[in-house]
Image (cartoon, rainbow, N blue to C red):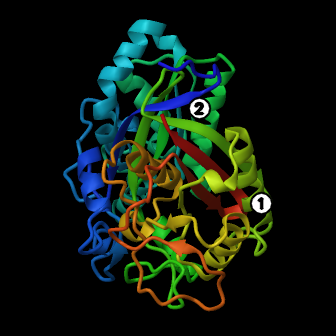
């Protein structure tokens, strides 16, 4: 085995629950399907009177009745599914390093807001809070507390909440813990669950599409809200995928709109490439933020064309998963992980859209369903751009 640089970190194990499925095999099969897009579908989950396209997890979720009330809820139920394949390797890490040397760093933007919404509706109707509600369900740190309790961990445990870049930044933070010697293993990723608050909020901005979203199309009209959880065990021990580099920036251009020139986004990508020690030409696939909003897609297409030209394969997978907000970076990392580690046919994650290019946007190489890479992927890039100009980029490599 080739000796590895001591600062190299690996994503050794993956657990996932999203609109595409609740296991690596289910998600990979749905992701690489060539006949029709899976995942996002018309749903009445949040409002029976106004069905809309959502990236909802439709599998039955665990009840978490064995836990204190403050740790129950949809967000943690999604995390519970993603935890299942990590339990054994995390237990091995605890046996090897000790529970105080295994950390938890997650990203989330909603935490338990859905439970709070239901509780407030109950209070308005009955004048009292419902049984089974605790205000701590909505606290931002609750997902990390849940994971640490479930796995018996006593290392650092915290949640990063920077809107749509939350879990990408969480993985960068996890890598820093390892490199600083503050932990020997980190459970990292993110989770967000559907709630009326986020759908109504984005609708008020005119950013929600009732139909499946259509990134980079001349006909794009907004996002589909999604949900899910993706978790990894990150260590310095060789695994199937490396986190080669990360970059972060905060350009603070506008509360909800990106800098049209994409200066902050480009800065994050350049930092990630530099930390990885590779050039833009070494990237074989880009998972785009690709929200299908007019401003994001215009900015992102300009940055990608400026940095990578028109020939680097790229796609937005949000027409399949929906935009899972604080979990988006983790879910899209999982998609890159599957493309790098579980992909003997070298399939590229597809870009599902209507094919009507916006003539106002620079040309980028959007991946048609069924397309395969000419050579096995060596490096992939994932981009996450959030409200307030909170940007993150992650570079992954096949081990």
| Residues packed near mark 1 inside 10 Å, few (<14), some (14 to 19) or many (20 plus) | many
Residue 230, compared with residue 88, is above or below; it is below
Residue lying at 36% horizontally and 14% vertically, measured from the top left: 92
Residue 395 in sight: yes
In the image, residue 97 lies at what x, y percent?
Answer: 48, 9
In the image, which disc is placed on residue 264? 1
Mark 1 or mark 2: which comes first in sequence? 2
Q: Which mark is residue 116?
A: none
Residue in the foreground of this view, choosing between 397 and 148: 397
Q: Position of residue 278 (x, y in %)?
A: 68, 44
Across and down, in percent, residue 285 comes to 52, 58
Determine the residue positioned at 59% across, 79% down: 205
Whole-angstrom CA distance, mark 1 to mark 2, is: 22 Å
Circle 2 crowding by C-alpha within 10 Å: few under 14, some 14–19, many from 20: many
Relative depth, front residue between 160 and 125: 160
Where disc 1 sits, the SS reads: helix
Q: Position of residue 227 (x, y in %)?
A: 39, 58
Establish if 325 lies above or below 340.
below
The circle on residue 174 is: 2
- Residue at far front of view: 374
Is residue 162 visible in the rendered image? The answer is no
């Amino acid at each position: 085995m080739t000796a590895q640089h001591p600062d190299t970190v690996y994503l050794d194990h993956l657990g996932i629950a999203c609109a595409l499925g609740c296991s690596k095999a289910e998600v990979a099969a749905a992701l690489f399907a060539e006949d029709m897009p899976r995942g996002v579908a018309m749903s009445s989950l949040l409002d029976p009177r106004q069905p809309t396209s959502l990236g909802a997890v439709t599998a039955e979720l665990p009840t978490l009745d064995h836990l204190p009330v403050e740790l129950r809820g949809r967000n943690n139920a999604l995390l519970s599914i993603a935890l299942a394949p990590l339990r054994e390797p995390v237990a091995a890490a605890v046996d090897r390093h000790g529970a105080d040397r295994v950390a938890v760093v997650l990203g989330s933007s909603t935490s338990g807001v859905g439970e709070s919404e239901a509780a407030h509706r109950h209070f308005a109707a009955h004048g009292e809070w419902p049984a089974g509600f605790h205000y701590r369900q909505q606290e931002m740190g609750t997902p990390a507390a849940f994971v640490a309790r479930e796995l018996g961990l006593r290392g650092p445990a915290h949640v990063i909440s920077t809107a749509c870049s939350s879990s990408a930044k969480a993985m960068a933070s996890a890598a820093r813990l390892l490199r600083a010697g503050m932990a020997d293993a980190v459970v990292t990723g993110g989770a967000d669950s559907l709630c009326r608050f986020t759908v109504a909020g984005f609708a008020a901005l005119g950013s929600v599409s009732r139909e499946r979203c259509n990134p980079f199309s001349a006909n794009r009209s907004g996002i589909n809200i999604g949900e899910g959880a993706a978790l990894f065990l990150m260590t310095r021990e060789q695994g199937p995928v490396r986190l080669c580099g990360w970059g972060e920036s905060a350009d603070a251009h506008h509360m909800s709109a990106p800098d049209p020139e994409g200066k902050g986004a480009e800065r994050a990508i350049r930092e990630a490439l530099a930390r990885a020690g590779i050039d833009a030409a070494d990237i074989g696939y880009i998972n785009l933020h690709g929200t299908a909003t007019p401003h994001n897609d215009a900015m992102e297409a300009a940055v990608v064309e400026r940095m990578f030209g028109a020939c680097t394969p790229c796609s937005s997978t949000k027409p399949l998963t929906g935009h899972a907000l604080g979990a988006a970076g983790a879910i899209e990392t999982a998609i890159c992980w599957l493309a790098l580690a579980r992909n003997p046919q070298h399939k590229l994650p597809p870009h599902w859209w209507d094919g009507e290019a916006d003539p106002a946007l620079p040309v980028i190489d959007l991946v048609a369903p069924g397309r395969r890479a000419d050579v096995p992927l060596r490096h992939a890039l994932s981009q996450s751009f959030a409200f307030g100009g909170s940007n993150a980029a992650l570079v992954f490599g096949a081990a």
